[in-house]
Image (cartoon, grey):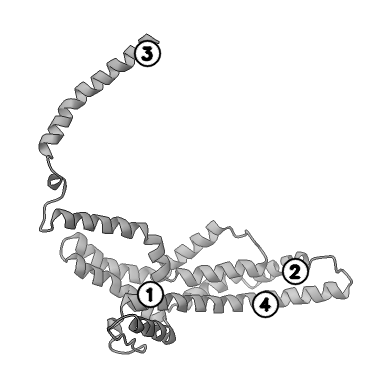
Amino acid sequence: MRRPLLAGLAIAGLVVAFAHPALAQTSSSAKTLADLIPSGDASISGRLVQLFGVVTILSIAPGLLVMVTSFTRIVIALSILRTGLGLQTTPANLILISLSLFMTFFVMAPTFDRAWNDGLAPLLSNEITEEEAFYRITDPFKDFMLSQVRPEDLTLFGDLASANSRDRVEPPEQGAADEADIGLRVLIPAFMISELRRGFEIGFLIVLPFLVIDMIVATLTMSMGMMMLPPTIISLPFKILFFVLIDGWNMLVGSLVRSFF
């Protein structure tokens, strides 16, 4: 018992002995917090706030992807398709989410390119300030959301914003010259409920033919006296066969992508 204890103490002493010069050198080179912050015009507290803001944005990045892109409409349509087919776990959630993400990147590619070229790339090159970069990055997403949002939803959140604020918020109609004046506070929730509405509209059209197949199969089984046999057991192969024969994935994906252009 003593030998392992003595060996451990010896190793600890060697580590401290070798680390002591490095610690001394570090303490001499960075004596204060200001030495750890990059030099610039901002104060220490300002740079800490900037760092905190960057970490916060990175933590909510998945939520931002859902809020301001085409992901909501696509994932709702694919989820309703799986329910209409009567398949609870096929395709798996990982497959649906991955397909929705890649379709979102395909639809949003021009918007992402514009945000990178106009805002993020100049910011990284120190050509523009953070405030100017924010507006340049958000402008492409605002244009995309304005092209998809319903005027009724803009009016709804414009009225709600004006009721909760001293400043009167007047959401313009689509095509108006002052569309750029709409704030993200009004535009993002209006865009999200518009996407939810369109997603359910597409989902209704997807489920309708499968509902007809279920009704036909249920009527046939009842007329044949097979009341104890669940109709879904018989209708499931027919729905899958029908979806495959009409090349359903090609039609659905193509229709979803075209709905954004």
| CB contact under 8 Å: marks 4 and 3 | no
CA gap between label 2 and label 1 equals 41 Å
* Mark 2: secondary structure: helix
Is 234 positioned to the left or the right of 145 in the image?
A: right
Return the disc, 4 or 2, that comes first in the chain's sequence.
Answer: 4
Q: Hey, which residue is sitting farthest right in the picture?
A: 225
Instruction: Find residue 176 and report its horizontal and vertical position in percent.
Output: 32, 90
CA gap between label 4 and label 3 equals 76 Å
CA gap between label 4 and label 2 equals 12 Å
Q: Splitting the image into 4 quarters, where does residue 32 fall?
A: top left
Pointer 3 residue = 4
Q: Nearer the viewer, mark 2 or mark 3?
A: 3
Q: Nearer the viewer, mark 1 or mark 3?
A: 3
Q: Nearer the viewer, mark 4 or mark 3?
A: 3
* Mark 3: secondary structure: helix
Pointer 4 residue = 209
Return the disc, 2 or 1, that comes first in the chain's sequence.
Answer: 1
Instruction: Find residue 216 and report its horizontal and vertical position in percent.
Output: 77, 77
Pointer 2 residue = 235
* Mark 1: secondary structure: helix
Inspect this view and state whether residue 244 appears.
Answer: no
Pointer 1 residue = 188
* Mark 4: secondary structure: helix
Inspect this view and state whether residue 211 appears.
Answer: yes
What's under tag 1, amino acid-wise? Ile
Q: Nearer the viewer, residue 177 or 17?
A: 17
Instruction: Find residue 136 and report its horizontal and vertical position in percent.
Output: 24, 71
Name the residue at 24% across, 19% down: 14
Name the residue at 28% across, 66% down: 116
| CB contact under 8 Å: marks 2 and 1 | no
CA gap between label 1 and label 3 equals 64 Å
